[in-house]
């Protein structure tokens, strides 16, 4: 009996070596990306990245109605095989069996083809009718401490180390969606939620809680939750009338990304030994006189040592990145994308990426982070800007850093010909350069900037001036988590201080600022009107939600006098007058200048506190007072 078993085993081994016994994929394929796909896309070609030991030597065949095998591409790394399929309009959802042959071995892989989920309540885009709430998942709320530290992952939680992870998660966001909606927010932008399994180095202030060093572009970081948790968060937000904006990065990944550890080809990333790290001089992109050296220091240099710079001119990588975006949009139903470091990859790639996304999802919106020094270099990035080269970015929305700079400086300096409120006036006066300034995303702070409370020196009246401005001028306002409760940086000046945990988001927090009682307690502790400022933000956003004149109405402003800036938002049905006194002294505002708007009205009603102001007599302004008046 023993001899017979040995002979049988030997016979099976011989048959396997001759390739007559087909094997499953588990022993050969480590991953296939994207993990699944859908029928119904306009551009039907699909790239499958197939990775495993010596898979580049394999050949693939399929037999699936409506799906054709276009080509197979190998690279210098034998562990990669790129399989291009054509998912034609005749293809139906089902399971595509990929048949692999490699020498005497044969094995199969079942690939799921789904039906697209439709767009009702999904892929809505965002526009000037919205108010965006920006939050950092690790720093917002921890609802599930059991996943804060995952065995085998390279960084755990340390509440005492500013640059360490704090344990916020997706369930914490879900649990506080009611707070965000009650605040008047209509869209939520999350800093990146993809896996960042990177080793921290606190001595050099390198922690990766922020999410901008991806190590897997198809997987939610397990310390936040699962892909399904993120999809659920998107769905629940949308059911509450809030859109979701996902943060993406195509300029770089983390050094511990799985494909960085085993590069498909030498040109998958730019050579840091040749190009070094970036100078952050993004104006070199459109500078007609820029040297090749300076241009390369933008598009080919690394962002930081821990973030290898991707070479989007490698066509295999470009296809991979574009498909990754389409996969997340269809998989999760998100409504928009904020593209991090939009100005750092090759502009031709960014244009093609944007074109592809909007071709497949025309109701979608994308805002590119274009951190530029002035209005012309910012406007260059918006779609249809008349460039000398004929370049078209296709990008609908841009981040309005010039307006942010004008606000942060203008609120802190005396009035003058081009200072104080005049700085804001002149910046908005350059809107003729933008294709559509109503699509600019505007803000007084974000995760990369000094907290607004520190910018205004803790002054509640300056705080209200900035909030009133971004909620009533043109564009799409964004509020950074914690700004509504006057969160500051605690006297520190590093990035982690800009991103401290939201009080009340962690078990055992003594103050819960998600509640009115907690905000009152926080204000008493800090000697600041925290609840009053929260209520101001809430009242103004709720009013704005229904104020279509702010969403779509025209803007007309007047040259600031005595550091008082006045502008009107108007349409056929409504007129709103905004008055911002940037001076430390009370002012009497002569209303005769504004008769082209006010002659048809008798009174102005302040939208937050309900006060009524006659329009036929001088208006008394308190120091640094903001008034938003509906004309009646």
Image (spheres, helix red, strand yellow):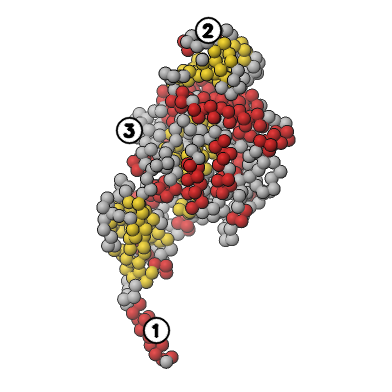
Q: Nearer the viewer, mark 1 or mark 3?
A: 1
Which mark is drawn over residue 9?
1
Q: Quadrant of residue 562?
A: top right
Quote the CA–CA distance across marks 1 and 2: 101 Å
Q: Helix, strand, or loop for circle 1? A: helix
Q: Helix, strand, or loop for circle 2? A: helix
Check disc 3: other Cα within 10 Å, few if <14, some if 14-19, many if 20+: few
Q: Residue at x 49, y 38 (%)?
A: 242
Which mark is drawn over residue 390?
3
Q: Residue at x 33, y 66 (%)?
A: 100
Residue 334 as seen in the image, left or right of residue 406? left
Quote the CA–CA distance across marks 3 and 2: 46 Å
Q: Helix, strand, or loop for circle 3? A: loop
Q: Nearer the viewer, mark 1 or mark 2?
A: 2
User: Which comes sooner in the sequence, label 1 or label 2?
Assistant: 1
Marks 2 and 1: in contact by CB < 8 Å? no
């Amino acid at each position: 009996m023993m001899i017979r078993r040995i002979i049988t085993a030997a016979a099976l081994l011989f048959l396997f070596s001759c390739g007559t016994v087909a094997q499953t994929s588990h022993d050969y394929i480590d991953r296939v990306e994207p993990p699944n796909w859908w029928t119904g896309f306009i551009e039907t070609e699909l790239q499958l990245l197939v990775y495993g030991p010596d898979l580049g030597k394999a050949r693939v065949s399929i037999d699936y109605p409506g799906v054709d095998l276009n080509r197979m591409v190998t690279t210098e790394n034998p562990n990669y095989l790129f399989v291009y399929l054509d998912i034609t309009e005749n293809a139906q959802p089902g399971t595509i069996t990929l048949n692999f042959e490699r020498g005497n071995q044969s094995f199969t892989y079942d690939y799921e083809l789904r039906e697209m989920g439709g767009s009702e309540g999904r892929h809505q885009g965002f526009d000037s009718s919205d108010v965006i709430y920006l939050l950092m998942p690790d720093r917002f709320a921890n609802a599930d401490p059991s996943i804060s530290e995952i065995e085998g992952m390279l960084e755990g939680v340390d509440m005492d180390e500013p640059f360490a992870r704090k344990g916020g998660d997706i369930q914490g966001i879900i649990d506080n969606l009611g707070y965000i909606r009650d605040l008047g927010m209509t869209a939520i932008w999350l800093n990146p939620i993809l896996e960042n399994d990177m080793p921290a180095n606190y001595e050099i202030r390198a922690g990766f809680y922020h999410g901008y060093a991806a190590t897997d572009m198809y997987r939610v970081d397990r310390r936040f939750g699962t892909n399904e948790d993120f999809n659920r968060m998107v769905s629940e937000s949308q059911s509450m009338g809030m859109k979701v904006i996902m943060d993406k990065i195509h300029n770089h990944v983390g050094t511990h990304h799985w494909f960085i550890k085993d590069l498909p080809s030498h040109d998958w990333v730019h050579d840091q030994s040749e190009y070094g790290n970036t100078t952050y001089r993004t104006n070199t992109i459109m500078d007609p006189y820029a040297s090749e050296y300076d241009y390369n220091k933008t598009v080919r240099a690394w962002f930081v040592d821990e973030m290898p710079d991707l070479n989007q001119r490698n066509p295999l990588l470009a296809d991979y990145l574009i498909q990754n975006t389409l996969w997340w949009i269809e998989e999760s139903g998100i409504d928009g994308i904020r593209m991090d470091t939009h100005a750092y990859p090759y502009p031709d790639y960014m244009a093609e990426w944007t074109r592809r996304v909007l071709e497949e999802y025309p109701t979608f919106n994308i805002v590119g982070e274009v951190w530029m020094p002035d209005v012309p270099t910012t406007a260059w990035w918006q779609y249809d800007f008349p460039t000398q080269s004929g370049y078209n970015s296709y990008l609908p929305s841009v981040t309005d850093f010039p307006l942010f700079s004008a606000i942060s400086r203008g609120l802190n300096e005396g009035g003058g010909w081009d200072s104080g409120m005049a700085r804001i006036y002149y910046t908005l006066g350059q809107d003729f350069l933008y294709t559509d300034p109503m699509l600019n995303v505007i803000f007084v702070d974000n995760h990369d900037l000094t907290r607004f409370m520190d910018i205004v020196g803790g002054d509640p009246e300056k705080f209200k001036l900035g909030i009133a401005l971004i909620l009533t001028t043109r564009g799409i306002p964004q509020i950074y988590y914690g700004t509504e409760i006057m969160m500051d940086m605690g006297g520190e000046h590093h990035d982690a201080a800009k991103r401290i945990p939201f009080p009340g988001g962690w078990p055992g927090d003594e103050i819960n600022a998600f509640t009115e009682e907690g905000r009152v307690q926080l204000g008493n502790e800090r000697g600041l009107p925290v609840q009053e400022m929260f209520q101001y933000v809430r009242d103004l956003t709720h009013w704005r939600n229904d104020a279509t004149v702010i969403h779509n109405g025209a803007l007309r402003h007047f040259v600031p006098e005595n550091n008082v800036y006045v502008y009107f938002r108007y349409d056929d049905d409504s007129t709103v007058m905004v008055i911002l006194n940037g001076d430390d002294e009370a002012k009497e505002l002569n209303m005769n200048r504004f008769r082209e708007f006010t002659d048809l009205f008798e009174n102005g009603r302040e939208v937050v506190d309900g006060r009524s102001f006659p329009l036929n007599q001088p208006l008394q302004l308190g120091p640094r007072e903001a008034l938003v008046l509906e004309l009646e």
